[in-house]
Image (spheres, rainbow, N blue to C red):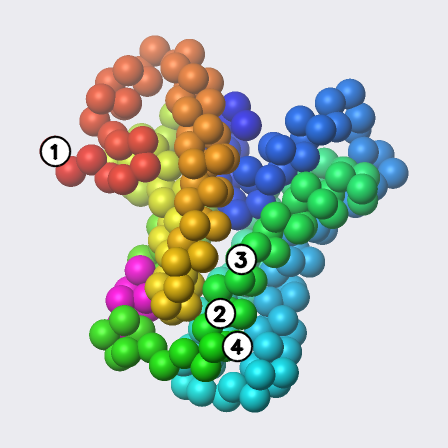
Amino acid sequence: MSTTNAESDAGTAGSPATRSANERTAGNNGVNGLKVSTYINAHKILVFPVVLGLMWYYDNGSTDAYIYLAMHGTYSILWLLKHAMYADRRFEQKLPVWVGGPFLFVPLAGYYVAPYLLISRHVTVPPPVVALALFVYILGIFYHYVSDAQKYYTLQIRKGLIRDGLFGRTRNPNYLGEILIYSGYAIMSLHWVPFLILAGWVFGFFVRNMLAKDRSMSRYPDFAEYKRRTGLLFPKLW
């Protein structure tokens, strides 16, 4: 997507797949389909039943399984609260089910691999690894939701580049938060596959979207200075 932090770049879990789906429906407004937010919200709503179902099926009521449920579950609840309080208007666009299903919902379902690997294998996660996963996850929650809220409410007051707060050192704090959140899940799985899936999203979609966002923001006279003092993804500290 080529939107900027002055125009709602969103930086959400569904946004890369949304772009992919949009590319497949050029010239089709998807009037008879479902809103993009419906596909994404359905995925979030299913997190609790999916993870609990895995725990029931594999007879795994371990502390690690419940920790994962709490992590992914709270993220999903926060997502739904965000949608209710400061929703991304782009997600009001409609997509036909034959596009939204396979090109949006199904790719997002790849994130269910982490709990499957954790729960089905009855993994015992060492306490230091649990601590690391929680540290990364909580930091990601902060960056993701706080930056989205900052962007949304700042743009209610003024338009233009957002160059302070969480956007003061990185141009994509919301993407950074998203990556950290799913890194926390991958760490809990103690398996390389969730990291591979996350890498596919990052290098297949996130990076492309961030670069497109930079190209769009370059029309602002003060963007060159802003780019010089910020990182594309990770905060530039000096």
Name the residue tied to disc 2: 117
In the rendered view, would you say 183 is above or below 208? Answer: below
Name the residue tied to disc 4: 120
Left or right: residue 154 versus residue 48 is left
Q: Residue 86, position in %: x, y?
A: 56, 48
In the rendered view, would you say 85 is above or below 25? Answer: below
In the rendered view, would you say 200 is above or below 184? Answer: above
Badge 2 marks a residue whose secondary structure is helix
Which of the two discs, 3 and 1, labels the residue nearer the N terminus?
Answer: 3
Residue at x 23% of width, y 74% of height: 128
In front: label 1 or label 4: 4
Residue at x 55% of width, y 38% of height: 16
Which of the two discs, 2 and 1, labels the residue nearer the N terminus?
Answer: 2
Which of the two discs, 4 and 3, labels the residue nearer the N terminus?
Answer: 3
Other residues around mark 4 within 10 Å, as few (<14) / some (14–19) / many (≥20): some
Mark-to-mark CA distance, 1 and 4: 45 Å
Mark-to-mark CA distance, 3 and 2: 11 Å
User: Which quarter of the figure has residue 41?
Assistant: bottom right
Relative depth, front residue between 208 and 233: 208
In front: label 3 or label 2: 2
Contact (Cβ within 8 Å) of mark 2 with mark 4: yes
Badge 4 marks a residue whose secondary structure is helix
Badge 3 marks a residue whose secondary structure is helix
Which of the two discs, 3 and 2, labels the residue nearer the N terminus?
Answer: 3
Residue at x 62% of width, y 38% of height: 18
Q: Amino acid at mark 1?
A: Trp
Q: State the extent of the magenta-drawn residues as a range.
A: 131-136
Whether 152 is among the magenta residues is no
